[in-house]
Image (cartoon, rainbow, N blue to C red):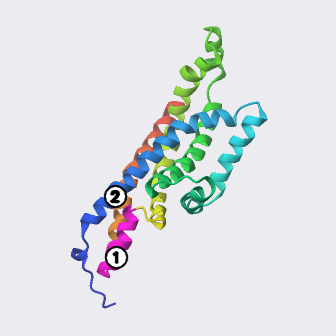
């Protein structure tokens, strides 16, 4: 192979700007997914079918369709169907946030089911109403148990955020594509981008592994 590598020709300025946008997307989507995932899990576990079924349909839709289809649908279909015109960044945040919300809801649901019955009985004995039991007993336990899964889902959204480049959000992948076209150095550009994604994702994955091992030790 007579290809001559030249990493110095890759400008890090645009990639840095793209990384900032990617992190903004990731943080905003995680806020939506973490905060709204829990009430969605409660709706899924409702005894009333008119509440439970739409919530289940919402979750299954986002879990069973590709994220890229969801992003494109929000970008093109929402303005046409609902006459709502938002920026591409906002559309990307909504699409990724709702996707994460569906996956986090399943994580919360499993954690809620793991709450010991004795704790709920103690809450009833103390005279706590259902809302108070949910806020003071179920929510703290569910969050603590589901933290590893929430972090894993958060990493997934960070990686899937690259898909918003298709709708012209100037994230890391968008800047990389532009830079590779301008410099004719796709190998160097996308190698650096891959290393950036790895550098952000790997430490979080190690934290997840540590939390999982610690939880297993506490349970044993």
Eyeballing the image, is 182 above or below 214?
Answer: below
Label 2 SS:
helix
Picture coordinates of residue 166, whole percent (x, y) = 48, 67
Label disc, if present, on residue 180 of the rendered structure: 1
Picture coordinates of residue 91, whole percent (x, y) = 50, 54
Q: Which residue lies furthest to the front in this view?
A: 83
Picture coordinates of residue 162, whole percent (x, y) = 45, 62
Label 1 SS:
helix
Residue drawn 52% across the image and 48% down it: 97
Q: Main secondary structure of the magenta part?
A: helix
Q: Is residue 192 left or right of residue 110?
A: left
Disc 2 marks which residue?
19
Residue drawn 52% across the image and 32% down it: 143
**Is disc 2 in contact with disc 1, using a CB cutoff of under 8 Å?**
no
Q: Residue furthest bottom?
A: 2
The residue range painted magenta reads 170-190
Label disc, if present, on residue 50 of the rendered structure: none
Q: Which of 191 and 118 is in front in this view?
A: 191
Task: State the separation of the CA atoms marked 2 and 1.
Answer: 16 Å
Eyeballing the image, is 47 above or below 3?
Answer: above
């Amino acid at each position: 192979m007579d290809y001559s590598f030249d990493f110095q020709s890759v400008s890090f300025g645009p990639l840095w700007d793209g990384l900032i946008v990617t992190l903004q997307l990731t943080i905003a989507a995680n806020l939506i997914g973490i905060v709204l995932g829990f009430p969605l899990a409660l709706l899924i576990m409702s005894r009333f079918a008119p509440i439970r079924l739409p919530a289940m349909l919402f979750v299954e839709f986002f879990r069973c369709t590709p994220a890229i289809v969801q992003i494109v649908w929000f970008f093109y279909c929402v303005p046409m169907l609902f006459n709502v015109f938002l920026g591409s960044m906002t559309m990307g945040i909504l699409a990724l946030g709702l996707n994460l919300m569906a996956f986090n809801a399943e994580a919360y649901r499993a954690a809620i089911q793991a709450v010991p019955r004795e704790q709920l009985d103690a809450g009833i004995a103390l005279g706590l109403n259902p809302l108070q039991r949910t806020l003071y007993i179920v929510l703290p336990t569910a969050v603590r148990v589901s933290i590893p899964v929430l972090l894993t889902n958060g990493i997934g959204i960070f990686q899937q955020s690259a898909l918003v480049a298709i709708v012209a959000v100037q994230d890391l992948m968008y800047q990389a594509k532009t830079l590779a076209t301008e410099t004719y150095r796709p190998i160097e550009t996308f190698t650096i981008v891959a290393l950036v994604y790895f550098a952000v994702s790997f430490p979080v994955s190690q934290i997840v592994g540590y939390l999982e091992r610690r939880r297993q030790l506490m349970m044993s």
